[in-house]
Image (tube, helix red, strand yellow):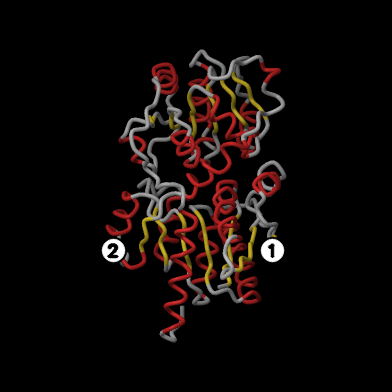
Amino acid sequence: MKLLTVIGARPQFIKAATVSRAIAARQDITEVIVHTGQHYDANMSDIFFDELSIPRPDHHLGIGGGSHGAMTGRQIEAIERVLLDEKPDMVLVYGDTNSTLAGALAAVKLHIPVAHVEAGLRSFNRRMPEEINRILTDHASDLLFAPTTTAMKNLSNEGLPRARMHLVGDVMYDACLFYGAQARKPAWFDPLSISEGDYVLATVHRAENTDDPVRLAGILQGLAGAERPVILPVHPRTQKQIESLGLSTPAHLHLVPPVGYLEMVWLEKHCAVIATDSGGVQKEAYFHGKPCVTLRDETEWVELVDVGANILVGANRERISNAIVGVGVMEIKSPLYGVGNSASVILSVMASRLSAASEVGIDS
């Protein structure tokens, strides 16, 4: 089986590393990796390939920046050319980015089966481009790999055929188990004179927060009001907005450069609490047993809220500060995201799907 994987953003690199490692252990699957370039600077892209030992992309499209429509359209056109040249048996996409949707649309229009990892997640906020990307990708895909029972229910509620759905757990949990022991302390941490276990780790990158001056100011003020050290690795978009708006940050709110995955894992493992608008970091907080304060009005990972591991606070200054100050120690009573073998289950399902189609002599 020739599998073509489309990736383009940091969370996808982490997930793809887990699946690519499982592919390397098999003899019946060949992987071709296409990097759209959606995250194109070294700190947001190259470092992850180096740290996670992901095979270098066979095709680097260099398409990043611009509006959502322009980026997605250019990606579809470029991916289509690659598909016509490579002629894969299946296309694999991850998550909810523009690269995800572009890969799915380019493949389905060429009648190439599509497999979607992280299918079925819904925030029910259709103003978020990620929500639209994920819904459209799910409805274009032949194999829907859902990480949770909630995701399975969402797919069923939208009328998608049960035969396409597979509950496989979360490949991010696979990654957590594999890379956790390789976590690396950032070189800049000790000079900050912050005690391990006594700081807030924050990430802010979603356009709904970084592109809205009121929300961004509320988040920064809320983090500052927590009255404990805060480490905020600054996404390039966030840094640009903070500077252009002239927002001030107190001394205990430490803005640091983007970090690699292994450094991020170390920061997650050694913090007191995590505040984030990232879907992936919400889960990583849970995996590492850290309470999470989510800087959004809703989340796709509703089971984390249900079990009390996650508190939704939006961009309200007081709610953010109060949640961080009042959060307690999180206790994990039962695993929510599988047992750490999601990547191998996904590959087995894909191989079986193509084998069955081949045996009956129909298009896969």
Q: Quadrant of residue 75?
A: bottom right
Kind of residue at disc 1: His
N-term-proximal mark, 1 vs 2: 1
Q: Position of residue 283 (x, y in %)?
A: 45, 39
* Mark 2 Cα-neighbour bin, 10 Å: few <14, some 14–19, many ≥20: few
Q: Is residue 134 left or right of residue 220?
A: left
Q: Position of residue 49 (x, y in %)?
A: 67, 49
As drawn, 256 above or below 24? above
Q: Which mark is residue 143?
A: none
Secondary structure found at label 1: strand
Q: Quadrant of residue 204?
A: top right
* Residue drawn at (43%, 65%) of the image: 349
Q: Which mark is residue 59?
A: 1
The residue under label 2 is 159
User: What quarter of the picture does the N terminus occupy?
Assistant: bottom right
Kind of residue at disc 2: Gly
Asked whether the residues under the numbered discs 1 and 2 touch, taking CB atoms below 8 Å apart as contact, a structural biologist would say no
Q: Looking at the picture, tell me which residue is in the foreground, 24 or 94.
A: 24
Q: Position of residue 149 (x, y in %)?
A: 32, 50
